[in-house]
Amino acid sequence: MSTATPSTTLPQELALITSVLELMTQEQQLLVSADTSGLDQLTPRKAQAVLAMTTLAQQRHTQLAAAGFAADEAGMQAWVDGNGAADALSGWQALLDKTREAKELNRINGMLITKQLSHTKGLINAMRTPTSGGEAGVYGKSGQAAPGGPSKRYVVG
């Protein structure tokens, strides 16, 4: 039976981060096309994969602490440098590379979300704001039709 080391979880972590990257790429496409139902289906899958990654990272950190290293990425780098195992080094470097890629993709997706929110707020404000001096907005802050809009009374005379 082999003893667990800080590099034991690396293959699983690498598979999960690759899966997260694929999900984030799909997320980006859904954001660009404003497909909210697709996002509703994808988000739980992404959250589940991230949770699994977090669990594996915690296991790695526990193993690092047991080996006398800091329970963080710097500790892992020190362990890999001191361990000298080629597979541990390549697995750790691949995980770091994929993590950097995921951070960049997350940044871009965040910008897309911000853009969509801004667009949506602009549309809502346009429906609330009068288009000319005497007209009332279409909708009030409550989402109900704004009072003082066009009159439905008829003038008889």
Image (tube, helix red, strand yellow):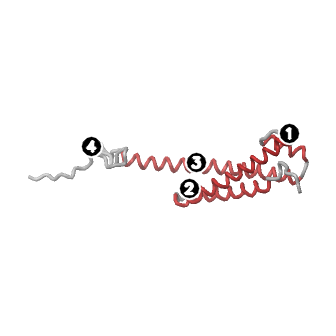
Q: Nearer the viewer, mark 1 or mark 2?
A: 1
Q: Is residue 79 visible?
A: yes
Residue at mark 3 to residue at mark 1: CA–CA distance: 40 Å
Q: Residue under circle 1?
A: 68
What label does residue 111 carry, if any?
3
Mark 4 Cα-neighbour bin, 10 Å: few <14, some 14–19, many ≥20: few
What residue is drawn where x is 60% and y is 51%? 109
Check whether the beta carbons of the residues at disc 2 and disc 4 lie within 8 A of each other.
no
Which of marks 2 and 3 precedes in the sequence?
A: 2
What residue is drawn where x is 78% and y is 44%? 61
- Label 4 SS: loop
Q: Nearer the viewer, mark 3 or mark 1?
A: 1
Check whether the beta carbons of the residues at disc 3 and disc 1 lie within 8 A of each other.
no
Question: x, y (%) of residue 12?
Answer: 77, 56
Q: Nearer the viewer, mark 4 or mark 3?
A: 3
- Label 2 SS: helix
Check whether the beta carbons of the residues at disc 4 and disc 1 lie within 8 A of each other.
no
Residue at mark 3 to residue at mark 2: CA–CA distance: 10 Å
Mark 1 Cα-neighbour bin, 10 Å: few <14, some 14–19, many ≥20: few
What residue is drawn where x is 55% and y is 60%? 38
Q: Residue under circle 4?
A: 134
